Image (tube, rainbow, N blue to C red):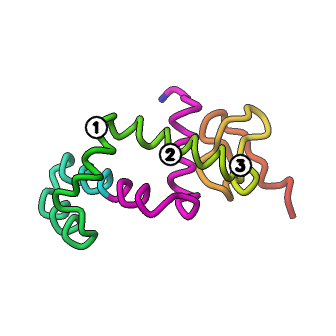
Amino acid sequence: MQYDEDRELTRYVWDYHEHLMTDFERRVGKAIFSRGKAAAGSRAVSQLLNRLWGLTDDAEVNAALTVGEEVFRRRVCQRVLAEFGSEVFINRCPQCNRVVRTPKALQCFWCGCDWHGNYA
């Protein structure tokens, strides 16, 4: 897999900084997750999640997603970074400067750099 800074940064912000998103953005995120389950063949799970989260035929969510799921997710990421940049820790590899998998990761998925021994 090739490294895509926007894709990785968006994934990281959505995975670890959801608390900085609005209630509506989180609701749309749940809809994206639910639709992904349906697309993967888990229609029953998707329907259950939609009922639990109150997303069945949500016109606001559908309108927000007319631009596409990835465009929506990237716009939210950009907004979070613009408004809360000082509160968002992006863990990057000290060697290649790419976004690593988690805020606590000490090894780079991309270049293999391992900095476990550098911290006590």
- The mark that comes first in sequence, 3 or 2, is 2
Q: Secondary structure at mark 1?
A: helix
Residue at far top of view:
2
Identify the residue shown where x is 33% and y is 34%: 67
The kind of residue tagged 2 is: Val
Percent x, y of residue 78: 58, 40
| Amino acid type, callout 3 | Gly
Residue 117, x across and y down, in percent: 83, 55
Residue at horizontal 73%, vertical 41%? 93
Disc 1 crowd rating (10 Å Cα; few below 14, some 14-19, many 20+) is few
Q: Is residue 9 magenta?
A: yes
Check disc 1 and report the residue beneath it. 66
Give the magenta range: 2-30
Give the image location of residue 19, x and y in percent.
Answer: 56, 64
Residue at the disc numbered 3: 85
Label 2: few (<14), some (14–19) or many (≥20) C-alpha neighbours in 10 Å: many
Closer to the N terminus: mark 2 or mark 1? 1
Residue assigned mark 2: 76
Name which residue type carries label 1: Thr
State the SS at label 3: helix
Q: Closest to the observer: 112 or 86?
A: 86
41 relative to 4, above or below: below
Please give the count of numbered marks on the rendered protein: 3
Residue drawn where x is 15% and y is 63% of the image: 47
As displayed, is residue 113 above or below residue 101? Answer: above
Q: Are marks 2 and 1 in contact (CB under 8 Å)?
A: no
